[in-house]
Amino acid sequence: MFSQNLPRSVRKGLRLFNQKDFYRAHECFEDAWQQTPDDSREFFRALLQISAGYFRLTQYRPDAAKKFFSRTLVWLKPFPNHHLGFDVVAIRHHVKELIDAINLGLAAEVIVKSKFQPLQSFMIKDDEDKMKILISGFEPFRNFSQNISKDLVQALPDQFGGQITLTKTILPVDNVKGPARIVEAIYQYQPDAVLSFGIAANRKKINLERIAINLKDYRIPDNTGVQISDQPIIPNGPAAYFTTLPIRKMLNSLSASGIPASISLSAGAYLCNQVFYTVMHEINHNYLPIKAGFIHLPASSETDPPKENSNTFAGLEQFIFAANILINTLFDEN
Ligand code: PCA
C-alpha cells in the first residue's frame, strides 16, 4: 500500500532515501519537482530539501542542513494535512525535531542515527483494515510432474472476505528467474506481506521456516541444469535473516485445527531458501513495510509422493485448509 500513485522519479527517490543515499534521492526529487506541472511540485521540492538536509548532515555540516530543513517547512506550508498519501503534519513534526536536534548541538552523525525515518513511514495506509498478500508457489522440478505448492497457490481464492486480497505468482525453479520474478512481483503489487510456498518432499509436516541463509548449495540441478555449490546468494550480504511472519501464532493456529506442523530451522540451500533469502534481503535493504516468510509443504498423497516417504500428508484440500488458517492468522496479526 505504499507510494502507488507517485511519479516514478519520486518512487525512486523514496527508495534511495530509505537506503540513506541522500544525494541521489535529492536528485530524483529534483527531477520530480522540475517535471511535475501541478501544485505537487512544491511538495516534491520539500522532499528534495529534506534529502539535501540529511545529505549535509552526513557531511557533518549541521548549519547547512538546518537551512534546508527550515526551507522544507516553508515549502510545506501551503499543503493540507494530507497530501498524496503522506501525513504532512508528521513530516513537519519530524523536520522540526531535526532542527531542534541541530540547535541542541547534537553531533550530525548522532542525529542521522537516532532520527532517521524512511519517508514511507509518513504515508497513511489508505485502508487500515485491508491487506494485500503476495503468495507464491513453485513450478515442478526434479523428476516430479507436479508441485503441490503451485496447485495450492492456484486453488486459493483471490479474495478473502473482502479484506484480504491475494496476488499469486508461480516461480520457475531457475536460479536466476525464480528469485527475480518474486522481487519483480513485490514492486509491481506492493503487498503488505509475502507468503511463499514450496515443497520439501522428505518432510512429514507443514514446516514454518524460521531462517533464510545466505547460501546456495544445491543438492540437485535447477530446471535449467545449473547446480551451484558453496556460493552466497548475496555476496557480502548478512549470513541470515529471520522470518517476519508470526510463525509461533501460525503454528498454534494450525495445531489447534489438527494440522501437523512445526517450526523449521532450515529451508535448505536450494531454490526455496534462495527465494526466501532474496525476499528478506530486498525488504531489509530497502526498508520496505512488508512481512515475509516461507512455508515448506510436505509430500502430498495426491502428487508425486517420493518412494522413501510412505507417510504422506493429506492432499490439496488439507493444504488449502492450512493456507486459510495461515492467511487469517497473518491478517489478525497485522
Ligand atoms: N522446493 C524446492 C524448490 C522448489 C520447491 O518446491 C526447495 O525446497 O528448495
Image (spheres, rainbow, N blue to C red):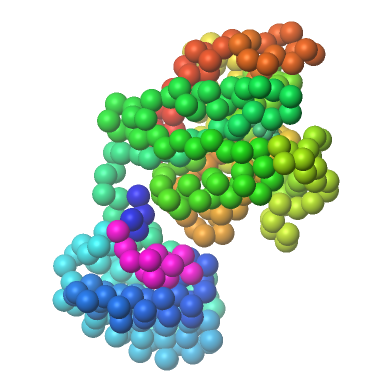
Where is residue 219, by image quadrant? top right
Question: Would residue 11 be counted in the magenta stretch?
Answer: yes
Residue 12 placement (x, y as % from top left): 44, 67
Q: Position of residue 119 (x, y in %)?
A: 39, 65
Q: Is residue 301 visible?
A: yes
**Which residue is drawn at the image coordinates 29% and 55% (left, top)?**
124
> Measured from the top left, where is residue 170 in percent x and y?
54, 35
Task: Using the image as rendered, state which of residue 266 and residue 133 is in the foreground.
Answer: 133
Left or right: where 152 falls relative to 32: right
Q: Residue at x 33, y 56 (%)?
A: 4
Q: How many marks?
A: 0
- Quadrant location of ligand 1? top right
Query: Does the image show residue 96?
Result: no
| Image quarter of residue 53 | bottom left
Q: Main secondary structure of the magenta part?
A: helix
Residues shaded magenta: 5-16
Looking at the image, residue 57 lies above or below residue 3: below
Q: Which residue is found at the position 35% from the left and 89% from the top? A: 67
Q: Is residue 244 magenta?
A: no
- 80 or 185, nearer to the observer: 185
